[in-house]
Every structure is written in structure tokens, then in C-alpha cells.
Image (cartoon, coloured by chain):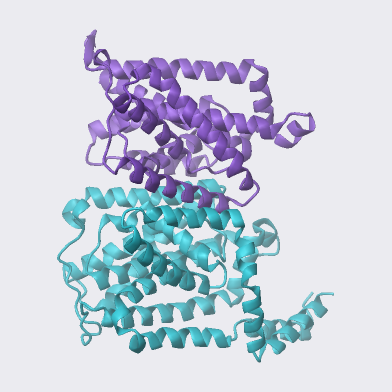
């Protein structure tokens, strides 16, 4: 019982790191980026190549995955995404779906279509018993890393100058521009950072979620659920939504395996009907 | 205050001029039916084009005329496909045309129920809800393996002859004539629909829902109606696929199918009914060519086409065809009457 809760929390935290970048993109530029999972996949494959082929230690590969995905995200944002911000939602959807298809086929071409694994160091494998609760070492690591990241994110958003500028831009980008805040630049940095986080999440997730070229398609719906259910106006919303989703998914698959992902899709649709702006949205009060 | 009778007459004239057949439309359908005799060895791919065109036509009804973005239109397609396949497999309804109608009605029922879910919220919410519904159905079809065959697909479907006379053959001759006839009939209905006052009110809802409701159009009712009709169309398209291939698999619900469908409609252009049909022709031949070239990686090129279309701009692509459309306009000997009617409406508006 508690083990399931623990696994669910780990899964949810991972989802949060994967999806948090998307929340900012959507909230800041009102941009529907279905290709977010492609950056996560990039991070995952970079880790696999670094660890398995080049023999880089697992822990050293994580920051590299973050950095590489962030750079890829930055380059894509500056060269391609900037042209699409002002277009309609339909155009954004088409554009990012196109990117997803391209990334899926390109990775398939380069890395092959089979699922890949990463060699996790031996001391991270297996479980240990903690007052009768089986705790996976690797999952504990994920909770620690993602927990630290969440605290750091919250700190950056709430306490730093960059964070306050970002929040200003999210709340009302026109006024923020009027105050002399370079919204475009903030957005580029945030996009790169979000892509980096997605890459890191992808790297951490290879062991748990599995990694193959269809990753962006498979998990697109999960990222979107986190963002739409959690709302885009704060970071706590997506965080809580990820935890609920993670626990719900793990528990659902454990207790009612016949229903599978049915549970979370139903929850998502019900929530969207009930609160179209997301469960933890502030927009209702404005 | 009632409008002067002259204005009413001008408006009805304008409406009927709008609904008049353009010569190129007639050429298009003659070509489609001539393909029965001209390309007997390409009937399999032509059949695919026919149901894909119908499917895209269905999306055009909600996207091009009502402005609803859907990422899960495959839900209705798949629902229709499974309905038709199950009806044929368990020999509940042996006549394909009747089974087709039942599948369409079933999909319409599903569309009616889910239409209430897409009424609310923004574009993003609609994307999520439509995508969620398609995934939900896929999951259901996967889990109810005893009924649907699960991941292996529904095998052993034997479709009986159409109207009890025309047997489906492996070269797709019957299949093409059958699909094309269904497509043509449904196209006529949709053409009537969008050129009616109802169709015009849909366009106004697409343009501005708030103002539309201010002039007395019940926005929700229109959206529910067109969504239901479009769902029925998609269901019939799926049923055509199931009947002509005697097979239904989970793939009918896949996200790729919904995404490809958007591409089909965008290639042809949304909002004039023929976009989906033309897009289906281009898409199928492109897919045929590319998948022969690189069997595994052709999604890459599909993705590239999508990205390029968006970066270049959809409006600009349609403006490239402007000269062709000007020539087409000159071909139409009745266009002058239409213009006159339109200008007299303008006159009454002053």
C-alpha cells in the first residue's frame, strides 16, 4: 500500500519535472507545444549514448543531458518557434505535431526502433525495507532530485528578480513589456530551461518509463494532463496535478489493471468539464 | 421592424447563387466516376482516397465551418469502423449499406453525447477533451478483447455483397464504386447543409460566438448539431474502411490518424468542402510514394510538410492558387449573376 504510494509519488515527481517547462510555455506565450516530449526524448537518448557507449558515469550524464536539451530547445526556439507564436492555435498544433513526427522518425533512423535501457550503477538498483515499506533505491533518488529541483524552481520563481519578471510576464505580458521587461528574452531562457528540465526528466525516466522513439507521442497526453489539470498560472498547480496523476496512475494500474489508463483519462475529462481552467487556477478570481 | 421585401429577395437570390454548381465541381465528380473505368488497377488506393476524403470532409464540417479544433476525430472513425466490423462478423446486419447507416447513427449518438464536452472551454481544452476521448475509446477497445479482439484486431470479418448483389473483390472494384457512391451522396448532403441558412449561421459562430448569440443564433445548439453530423460522417468513413478491408484494429483510434487527418485537410484547405477530398488525393499519393521510398521513416516527411506549411503560412499557400481560381471564376458563366446578387445585398445594407 505505502509502496504504491511511494512509487506513485516518484512517478508524479518525474512527470512534474518533465512537464513543468510546458506549463511555463503555455502560460507565458499561450503557445501549445505538443513537441515538448521530443526534448525529453532527446535528453533520454543523450544519457543512453553517454552512459552505454562512451562510459560516462550515470550521475555525470544527468547535467549533460540537461545542458544538451536546453541548447537544443534554445536553438529551436530562436530559429523556428518564434515564427509561430503569433499564429492561431491550429497552426501551433500542426507545427508542433510536425516536429513530433520528424523527431520520432529521425530518432528511429539514428537509434533504431527498439526500446533502449541505461546501465544504472549497482548501488541504485533493488529495494530496501524501511519499516515494512519496500522502497526502490532508484525511485528514492528520483524523489530526492526532483524534490530539490521543485524547491529550487519555487525559489527562483518566488525570490529572484528573474522569477518576478517571469511572473509579471505570465500575468500580463503587455504591461510587462511596457515596464521595460524583455519578455522575448525571458521567454527564450525559460523555454531553454524548460526543455533542459524535460531532458533531465527524460534521462531520469529511461529506467522507469522506458524509452523508444514513440516516447513523445506516448507521453504527450500525460504532459498535457499535468498542465491543463494543474493550470498554468503557478508552479504548485502542475506539481499537485503531477502527484495526483502519478499516484492515480500507479494505483489504478495496480488495483484495477483491467482498466489500465482508463482511470486517468476519465479523471482528466471530468476535471476539464468541471473546471475548464484547471483545478488550481487563479484565473477564476481575477 | 421587418426588412423590405426587396432585401429578402436579394438575400434568397444570394443564397441560391452561393449554392449553385461551379463547372469545375462537375468536372471533379465526372473525373472521380470516370476513374472507375480509367484506372481499374488503382482501385485499391482510390478506395482509400474515398474514405479518407469522407473522413476529412467530416473534419472540415467542424473545423472549417464551426472552428472547432479536434485532435481526436479518430474516435468517431474508429467507433464506426468497429461497429460495422462487429455487425458483419456476428452477422447481425448482413447488408453492408444498412450496416453502414447503423454505424453512422451509432457514431452520431457518440458525437451527440460528447459534443457537450467540447462546448466549454478554450481551444486547448477542446484539444485535450477530443484527444482524451479518442484515447479513452482506444483503451476500451484494447481492454474489451473478448469483443474487439484487443491488440490483434478484429479478424474473421466477412462482409456480405452490397445490396445482396455486388460482392467485394480483392481488386477493390466493388469497394471503389461503393465508397465513391457513399462519398458522393454524403457530399451532396453536406453541400446542401453548408449552403443553407444553418451553414451561414455556423460561419458566423466561427467568426464570433458572442456577437452571433447577440443576433439571436443559439451558438451551443448549432455546435452540437454540426458536431453530431460530423461524427456521423466520420463513423461512416470508418465503416467504409472496415467493410472494404474486412478488418478493424486498434490503429483506427490512434493519434496518428487524427493528426494525419489534420494534415490532409490543411493540404487541401479548410472551409470549402473540396479541401478534404483534394487533400486526400495528394496525401495518399504522397504517402504511397514516400512509403515506397523509405518504408519506415516516411512520417518524417509528413512532419516536414506540416512544419513547412505552417512556417510558410496557410494563407500564402492558398494565395498561390489564386491565378487558378481566377481562371476558374472566368469559366463560370453564372458568376456574374452571383456578383450582382451580392452587390444588391450590399446596397440594401447601406
Compared to A253, does A146 lie above or below? above
Which colour represents chain A?
purple
Task: Find residue B233 and report its horizontal and vertical position in percent.
Answer: 41, 69
Task: Find residue A244 and report its horizontal and vertical position in percent.
Answer: 40, 28
Residue occupying the point 66% across, 21% down = A162
Residue that protrudes farthest toward the front in the picture: A54
Give whichever of A221, A282 is nearer the camera: A221
Residue occupying the point 42% across, 58% down = B260
Residue occupying the point 49% across, 57% down = B305
Let me know if residue B232 appears in the view.
no
Residue B87, located in which quarter of the rendered image?
A: bottom left
Residue B75, located in which quarter of the rendered image?
A: bottom left
Compared to A257, does B138 lie above or below? below
Relative placement, left or right, of B306 versus A1 is: right
The chain drawn cyan is chain what? B
Residue that protrudes farthest toward the bottom in the picture: B333
Residue occupying the point 51% across, 30% down = A70
> Which quarter shows the N terminus of chain A?
top left
Give whichever of A133, A108 is nearer the camera: A108
Task: Find residue B280 and report its horizontal and vertical position in percent.
Answer: 43, 69
Amino acid at each position: 500500500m505505502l509502496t504504491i504510494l511511494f512509487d506513485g509519488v516518484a512517478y508524479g515527481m518525474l512527470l512534474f519535472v518533465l512537464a513543468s517547462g510546458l506549463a511555463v510555455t503555455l502560460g507565458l506565450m499561450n503557445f501549445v507545444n505538443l513537441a515538448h516530449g521530443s526534448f525529453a526524448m532527446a535528453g533520454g537518448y543523450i544519457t543512453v549514448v553517454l552512459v552505454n557507449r562512451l562510459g560516462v558515469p550515470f550521475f555525470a550524464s544527468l547535467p549533460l543531458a540537461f545542458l544538451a536539451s536546453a541548447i537544443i530547445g534554445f536553438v529551436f526556439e530562436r530559429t523556428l518557434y518564434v515564427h509561430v507564436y503569433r499564429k492561431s492555435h491550429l497552426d501551433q498544433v500542426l507545427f508542433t505535431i510536425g516536429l513530433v513526427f520528424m523527431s520520432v522518425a529521425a530518432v528511429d533512423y539514428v537509434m533504431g526502433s527498439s526500446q533502449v535501457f541505461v546501465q544504472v550503477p549497482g548501488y541504485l538498483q533493488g529495494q530496501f525495507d524501511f519499516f515494512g515499506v519496500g522502497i526502490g533505491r532508484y525511485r528514492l533518488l528520483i524523489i530526492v532530485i526532483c524534490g530539490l529541483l521543485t524547491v529550487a524552481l519555487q525559489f527562483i520563481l518566488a525570490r529572484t528578480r528573474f522569477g518576478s519578471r517571469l511572473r509579471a510576464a505570465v500575468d500580463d505580458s503587455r504591461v510587462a513589456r511596457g515596464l521595460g521587461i524583455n519578455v522575448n528574452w525571458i521567454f527564450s531562457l525559460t523555454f531553454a530551461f524548460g526543455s533542459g528540465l524535460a531532458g533531465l526528466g527524460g534521462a531520469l525516466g529511461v529506467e522507469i518509463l522506458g524509452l523508444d522513439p514513440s516516447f513523445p507521442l506516448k507521453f504527450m497526453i500525460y504532459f498535457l494532463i499535468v498542465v491543463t489539470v494543474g493550470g498554468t498560472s503557478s508552479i504548485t498547480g502542475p506539481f499537485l496535478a503531477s502527484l495526483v496523476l502519478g499516484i492515480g496512475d500507479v494505483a489504478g494500474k495496480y488495483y484495477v489493471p483491467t482498466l489500465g489508463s482508463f482511470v486517468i483519462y476519465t479523471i482528466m475529462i471530468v476535471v476539464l468539464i468541471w473546471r475548464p481552467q484547471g483545478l488550481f487556477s487563479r484565473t477564476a478570481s481575477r | 421592424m421587418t426588412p423590405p421585401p426587396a432585401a429578402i429577395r436579394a438575400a434568397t437570390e444570394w443564397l441560391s447563387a452561393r449554392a449553385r454548381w461551379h463547372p469545375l465541381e462537375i468536372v471533379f465528380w465526372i473525373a472521380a466516376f470516370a476513374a472507375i473505368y480509367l484506372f481499374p488497377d488503382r482501385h485499391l488506393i482510390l478506395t482509400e482516397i474515398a474514405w479518407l476524403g469522407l473522413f476529412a470532409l467530416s473534419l472540415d464540417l467542424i473545423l472549417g465551418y464551426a472552428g472547432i479544433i479536434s485532435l481526436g476525430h479518430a474516435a468517431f472513425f474508429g467507433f464506426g469502423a468497429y461497429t460495422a466490423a462487429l455487425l458483419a462478423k456476428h452477422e447481425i446486419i448482413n447488408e453492408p449499406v444498412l450496416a453502414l447507416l447503423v454505424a453512422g447513427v451509432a457514431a452520431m449518438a457518440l458525437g451527440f453525447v460528447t459534443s457537450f464536452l467540447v462546448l466549454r472551454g478554450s481551444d486547448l481544452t477542446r484539444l485535450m477533451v477530443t484527444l482524451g476521448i479518442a484515447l479513452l475509446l482506444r483503451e476500451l477497445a484494447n481492454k474489451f478483447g473478448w469483443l474487439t479482439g484487443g491488440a490483434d484486431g478484429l479478424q474473421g470479418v466477412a462482409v456480405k455483397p452490397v445490396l445482396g448483389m455486388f460482392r467485394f473483390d480483392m481488386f477493390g472494384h466493388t469497394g471503389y464504386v461503393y465508397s465513391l457512391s457513399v462519398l458522393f451522396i454524403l457530399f451532396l448532403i453536406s453541400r446542401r447543409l453548408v449552403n443553407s441558412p444553418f451553414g451561414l449561421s455556423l460561419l458566423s459562430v466561427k467568426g464570433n460566438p458572442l456577437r452571433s448569440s447577440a443576433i439571436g443564433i443559439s451558438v451551443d445548439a448549432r455546435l452540437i448539431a454540426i458536431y453530431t453530423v460530423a461524427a456521423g460522417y466520420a463513423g461512416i468513413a470508418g465503416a467504409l474502411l472496415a467493410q472494404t478491408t474486412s478488418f478493424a484494429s486498434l490503429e483506427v483510434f490512434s493519434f496518428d490518424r487524427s493528426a494525419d487527418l489534420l494534415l490532409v485537410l490543411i493540404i487541401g484547405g479548410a472551409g470549402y468542402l473540396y479541401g478534404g477530398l483534394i487533400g486526400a488525393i495528394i496525401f495518399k499519393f504522397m504517402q504511397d510514394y514516400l512509403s515506397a521510398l523509405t518504408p519506415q521513416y516516411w512520417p518524417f516527411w509528413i512532419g516536414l510538410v506540416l512544419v513547412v506549411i505552417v512556417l510558410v503560412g496557410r494563407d500564402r499557400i492558398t494565395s498561390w492558387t489564386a491565378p487558378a481560381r481566377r481562371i476558374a471564376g472566368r469559366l463560370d458563366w453564372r458568376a456574374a449573376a452571383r456578383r450582382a446578387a451580392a452587390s444588391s445585398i450590399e446596397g440594401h445594407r447601406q
